[in-house]
Amino acid sequence: MTEKEKMMRQMLYDANNDKELIRERCAAKDLCYDFNRMRPSDFVGQQKIIRQLLGKISGDFCIVPPFWCDYGYNIEIGDNFFANHNTVILDCAKVKFGNNVFIAPDCGFHTAGHPIDAQRRNKGLEYAYPITVGDDVWIGAGVQVMPGVTIGSNVVIGGGSVVVKDIPSNVVAVGNPCRVVRTITDEDKLKSWDRT
């Protein structure tokens, strides 16, 4: 079994010494580099590179440079997707975003992790667990989403949160570790700003 096959099967794998994975990461990072160096007004050129880079795009999108990812082909975005400056997606496993997902600056989605024990970690072994984000989700500034997390639909994740466990639909969640603080209700449609 190749290291890439192990990676895709959520097994421990060695990404540091595998020629195929190194080549694929370099290709993705070259595209990210080109994307990040484009003039901000070159929307056509930016979109062309992102379409080459990502695995699946289901409609309109806007990704504001700089943007970085590991492979690109494991990232799927739905319609009306927006990612602000400094979004990082370590897509060693699938990262799927639904429709109407808005990501604020300085957010990270990290499918990759390393063993707790130093012996295996020092050998360069890692694992990758998928991340899924539902529809109609707003991710606040500085949020970090960890391996294996699913975020439901109609969710707001408060700025600075570290999401280590699944978040159900229809809630506001915040903190480190990120926790549900309340349900989203019809009353929220009447408010212009809520600091809870």
Image (cartoon, rainbow, N blue to C red):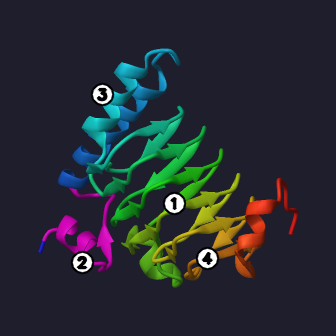
Image: magenta residue range: 2-18
Residue 48 numbered tag: 3
Mark 1 vs mark 4, CA separation in Å: 21 Å
Circle 2 Cα neighbour tier, 10 Å, few/some/many (<14 / 14–19 / ≥20): some
Q: Which residue is mark 2?
A: 9
Residue 2, picture quadrant: bottom left
User: Which element carries disc 1, helix, strand or loop?
Assistant: strand
Front residue of 187 and 24: 187
Whether the residues at callouts 3 and 4 have beta carbons within 8 Å, the answer is no
- Counting residues from the start of the chain, the first of labels 4 and 2 encountered is 2
- Residue 119, above or below 60: below
Query: Which one is in front in this view, the residue at disc 4 or the one at disc 2?
Result: 4
Mark 3 vs mark 4, CA separation in Å: 34 Å
What residue type is disc 4 on? Asn
Q: Which residue is mark 4?
A: 170
Q: Which residue is mark 1?
A: 109
Residue at 61% x, 53% y: name it: 107
